[in-house]
Amino acid sequence: MKKILFYLIGAVLLVFSGCAGSGNGYRIVDNTIVFDVPERAEGQKSVLGLRTEPLDTVRVGFIGLGMRGPGAVKRFTYLDGVEIKALCDLLPDRVATARKILADRGWPEAAEYSGEDGWKALCERNDIDLVYICTGWQKHVEMAVYAMRHGKHVAIEVPAATSVKECWELVDVAEQTQRHCMMLENCVYDFFEMTVLNMAQQGLFGEILHVEGGYIHNLDEFWDRYQGNWRLAFNQEHKGDVYATHGLGPACQVLDIHRGDRMTRLVSMETVSVNGAATAKKLMDAGTFANGDHTVTMIQTARGRSILLQHNVYTPRPYSREYQVTGTKGFANKYPSEGFAFSDTDPEKFGLADHEDLSGHSFVSEETRKMLMEKYRHPITAEIEAKAREVGGHGGMDFIMDYRLVYCLRNGLPLDQDVYDAAEWSCIGDLSAASIENGNMPVEFPDFTRGDWNKTDGYRHAVAPVR
């Protein structure tokens, strides 16, 4: 009897250690959370470096005209080689607002859709190449999948997906349809981040060891602007870093993620919810609130580098994306003030008269910082900065994002952000929640490229050949 009992206990322990959390799409193996990685279906192929037929004119339809959509519509009216064919929102009055934007800019009228299923009719049109999605997070994947299955390229506001399962759905459908699926992560186009990326690619920081990013933004004045309270309601139900992409995107580009390195595991922890819970009680009469006021996530990569992410949308702190890059020979910092530090004192390398302004112990002078920002300004920024600042959108980075999207589609080039970026950057919400819910347990990253992460040698923006 004792022997039978021993085997029964052993079987129970095996099930607990090997399959716990399987209802959430993961198992616990050797005290590590492992998410399922589905096999690539027969006939389905990678979209790494995907090139599609060049489009002389990019015909676009917009879905979601609340907070982000109208700005996108207006920005597109400043782009060459585009036609705005359709506008859609749940509420007709928002469509009317977007219609006025087109009229004020002297653009032709676009087809109009509204209601619960208006977006489906937009996706089914045969005169649209790109569907641009600016709705609440919960609808992103459903809409993107429907659009891709109807032959459209898609661009999706951040995050592209809210679960690992949804991330795989985006990857699989993009691979099945061979359509572009880009997440609209605008912060990778910030002027400072673009300059730092260029400096890193030219070796000024040496070997990159560690990058930090985050989203620190008190949303108290914005909660009631989200249609149907969807954003606070989502946070009320979900732990973890649910909005990681603004901080993670620039970090992944400078670290060549899935272009020679990959994120392998993370550990997350959070504070108790005080301000978040109070806000939910006030606005929703909610008795519980899952999301901690401050969440911290540490990430390891295959090449032994690290990333630190933070999320806090509840407490009174100055806005920050926490962007820092630490290399063997230099350092870059964006918040609260921009600065660089270097151990290399070769004056010719930095365009200085002497080496006295370079020290690894402090930031370079303001004069030198400005000189470096100009000398190493990214070529894309140099090309379009003046117009971007004129058109605007978070200081111009939104316009650069749209410009690059259209440029790549018109030239048949790989997009700056692919579906694997969308999945890798969006899955942090689910992975960090799993870590927190299991006592800060390590979580393995799914490899959304299915083994292809080191087949591309470094991150680069695609450029069309000179004609």
Image: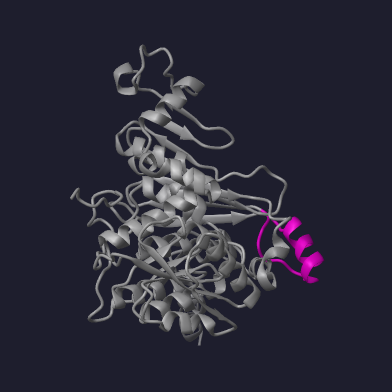
Front residue (pair 158, 277)? 158
| Image point (29%, 18%), residue name | 348
Q: Quadrant of residue 456?
A: bottom left
- Whether the magenta-drawn stretch holds residue 278 is answered as yes
The magenta stretch spans which residues?
272-293
5 on left or right of 60:
right
- Whether the magenta-drawn stretch holds residue 454 is answered as no
| Image point (56%, 73%), residue name | 138
Q: How many numbered circles does the render carry? A: 0
280 on left or right of 45:
right
The percent position of residue 154, horizontal first and vertical second, equals 40, 70
Residue reaching furthest to the front: 106
| Image point (36%, 75%), residue name | 152
The percent position of residue 424, horizontal first and vertical second, equals 41, 61
Query: Measured along the vertical axis of the image, is residue 319 above or below residue 142?
Result: above
Query: Measured along the vertical axis of the image, is residue 46 above or below residue 71?
Result: below
The percent position of residue 41, horizontal first and vertical second, equals 28, 80
